[in-house]
Image: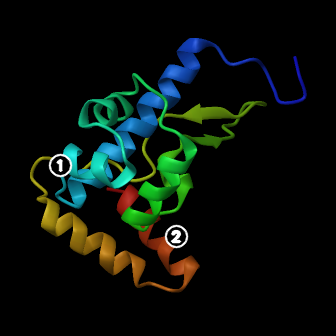
Amino acid sequence: MSILGPPQTDLTRRAVYTHIGDRLRHHRLIMRQSQTQIAQLIGVSPQQYQKYETGKSKCPIDALLKLCQHYQIDVENLLPHERAPSGESAQMSMRPALPLAPSDVDAAELARLIAAYGQISDRMKRLKLVELIEMQ
């Protein structure tokens, strides 16, 4: 084992690429944009961008950073989060940082919620709000 932890398998990498792709798709849909529009933004073909969203291709870091700036999100929002359960080692959570919206929540309502959340400057209030929502 290296100092960077256990070696990642292709399966683990693929799961991470798929997770990032799911998050990219989530944010694109919130913004009501097409894959073609986003592909043009980052300078790739729509087919290539589709591969990023499905996890079939790794999205380059410069494109990820451009997308994060476009969506006004932190890059951490795209990544799987590690959390330490009661056991010794941390496990990777493939759950999105923001859960995908249920089908009965329209994109406008979700965008309004996200915008309002972004206006809360007090970090502790934001954390308490998330805890309250997760209790549902």
Q: Residue at x 41, y 77 (%)?
A: 118
Kindly report which numbered mark, 1 or 2, lies closer to the viewer in this rendering: 1
Residue under numbered circle 2: 127
* Mark closest to the chain's N terminus, 1 or 2: 1
Q: Residue at x 42, y 68 (%)?
A: 72
Residue under numbered circle 1: 34
- Quadrant of res 45: top left
Q: Residue at x 22, y 52 (%)?
A: 37
| Residue 25 sits above or below residue 94 on the image | below
Check disc 2 and give the amino acid type: Leu
Check disc 1 and give the amino acid type: Ser
Element type where label 1 sits in the image: loop
Tell me the quarter of the image containing the C terminus.
bottom left
Left or right of 34? Residue 71 is right
In percent of width and height, residue 4 lies at: 83, 30
Left or right of 36? Residue 72 is right
Q: How many marks?
A: 2
Nearest the eye: 22 or 103: 22
